[in-house]
Image (cartoon, grey):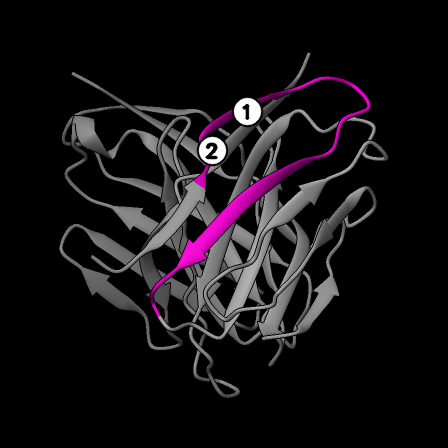
Amino acid sequence: RKEVEQDPGPFNVPEGATVAFNCTYSNSASQSFFWYRQDCRKEPKLLMSVYSSGNEDGRFTAQLNRASQYISLLIRDSKLSDSATYLCVVNEDSSYKLIFGSGTRLLVRP
Amino acid sequence: DGGITQSPKYLFRKEGQNVTLSCEQNLNHDAMYWYRQDPGQGLRLIYYSQIVNDFQKGDIAEGYSVSREKKESFPLTVTSAQKNPTAFYLCASSPRHGQYSGNTIYFGEGSWLTVV
């Protein structure tokens, strides 16, 4: 089993749609969680951190479910510019090592 | 502006040659990392460094070497021992955080290495 697993997609949705991605992690001791966005042939950029209480940033909502060991990302009112690959990232312990999922590709069509 | 600078952006290497990718940061971050990304894949950790003059192997260190003589710099050498080096290489850095406080990582723009 991979340490961090994501559905590769692609998720093909119309503009204005709501779309959700899940990411599962295998290590129950994982402590920090993040969503990164990566555009084609570019570096990943931090989208948001994921907190136990859940957090929201505009159209984006991230949630953590420790009991089931998954995190989620919800995008409301999708824009064409949201088309990208979304990477789930987990920090397993107090070290500096981050574990990256393979990413979920989102395509938003007009 | 503060950030991470990688160079070169595109590099072609002949088989049997060593090449060095540069990574410089002016964010005053303690930790630096090198990742490799293959098409359609996630990032895999090659090496990381938590402090000057110290570095640790990641998951795929074979065929690579690094140095951390200065806080700002963490160059990666891809040696001829790396059998399949064609990939996208990402350098990153992060501030020093304590346990439970999270660890946000910032990336350079990446270097594309192609073996010809």
Q: Quarter of the image holding residue B24?
A: bottom left
Q: Quarter of the image holding residue B56?
A: bottom right
Of the pair B76 and A52, the residue shown nearer to us: B76
Residue B94 vertical placement versus B61 (above, below) = below
Where residue B29 appears, x then y in whole percent? 42, 72
Of the pair B5 and A83, the residue shown nearer to us: B5
Marks 1 and 2: in contact by CB < 8 Å?
yes
Q: Quadrant of the C terminus of chain B?
A: top right
Q: Which residue in the protein does label 2 denote?
A: B8
Query: Dot 1: what SS?
Result: strand
Question: Residue drawn at (49%, 71%), measured in percent from left and top?
Answer: B71
Residue A79 vertical placement versus A59 (above, below) = above
Question: Residue drawn at (74%, 33%), measured in percent from left and top?
Answer: B18
Q: Amino acid at mark 1?
A: Leu
Of the pair A44 and B17, the residue shown nearer to us: B17
Residue A39 vertical placement versus B1 (above, below) = above
Question: Residue drawn at (59%, 74%), measured in percent from left and top?
Answer: B50
Marks 2 and 1 belong to one chain? yes
Where residue A8 appears, x then y in whole percent? 53, 32
Q: Quadrant of the N terminus of chain B?
A: bottom left
Magenta stretch: includes residue B65 = no
Q: Residues within 10 Å of mark 2 (few under 14, many from 20)?
A: some
Q: Magenta region: which residues?
A: B7-27
| Chain of residue at mark 1 | B
Where residue A37 appears, x then y in whole percent? 36, 43
In this view, the residue farthest toward the top is B116
Q: Amino acid at mark 2?
A: Pro
Q: Which residue in the protein does label 1 denote?
A: B11
Question: Residue drawn at (50%, 60%), measured in percent from left and top?
Answer: B73
